[in-house]
Amino acid sequence: MESVCYYDYPIGTIGIAEENGAVTRVFYADAKAPKAHANAETPLIKKAAVQLGEYFGGTRKQFDLPLSLRGTDFQRAVWAALISVPFGETRSYKDIAVQIGNPKACRAVGGANHRNPIMIIVPCHRIVGHDGGLGGYACGQAVKRGLLGLENAFYAVP
């Protein structure tokens, strides 16, 4: 059974879900949407919450958590490529398509990016349009802009 807890961060409330010893979801909990009932905080959920807090505080650039990414083979390939994008950097949808060996799949990469179940930790916010435009983001462009701004602010610090 999946355990879920909610935490407040600078971008709003984020839900963290865990099942069988792996993080299964990290998601933006829209203030307008009713929150699912939170279960007891597990040690892994607490560890994920601490690491997200460190990320927002600028002291964490990489996450060290077991993840369970559930999706198609294509989606999992895209999500693995997203994890390889370093903190403070961006890649285009086309860059990711080329990286996974399917250079014509830019739109499909966008679709997989949109369905990413583990936001921030699997950094879909680091993927932008080929022309440098923000592109879409499941949590909205303001949140994406904020995450990229946060990373750029801390990236410049040695």
Image (cartoon, helix red, strand yellow):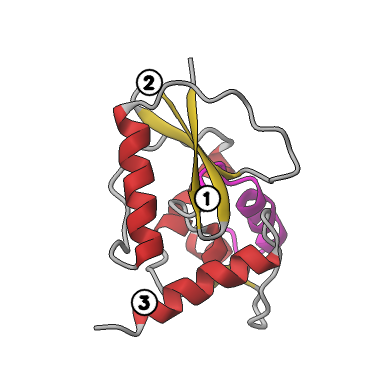
Q: Is residue 116 left or right of residue 3?
A: right
What residue type is disc 1 on? Answer: Met
**Earlier residue among tags 1 and 3:** 1
- For mark 2, what is the residue? 20
Query: Whole-Å distance between the Cαs marked 1 and 3?
Result: 19 Å
Can I make out residue 95 in this image?
no
Can I make out residue 34 in this image?
yes
Does 154 appear in magenta?
A: no
- Provide residue 120's location: percent of width, then percent of height: 48, 55
- For mark 1, what is the residue? 119
Q: Is residue 152 left or right of residue 147?
A: left
Q: Nearer the viewer, mark 1 or mark 3?
A: 3
- Provide residue 140's location: percent of width, then percent of height: 70, 60
Element type at mark 1: loop
What residue type is disc 2 on? Answer: Asn
Query: Whole-Å distance between the Cαs marked 2 and 1?
Result: 19 Å
Does 112 appear in magenta?
A: yes
Q: Nearer the viewer, residue 97 or 49?
A: 49
The number of discs equals 3
Q: Where 94 sits versus 133, above or below?
A: above
- Mark carried by residue 154: 3
Residues drawn in magenta: 102-118
**Earlier residue among tags 2 and 3:** 2
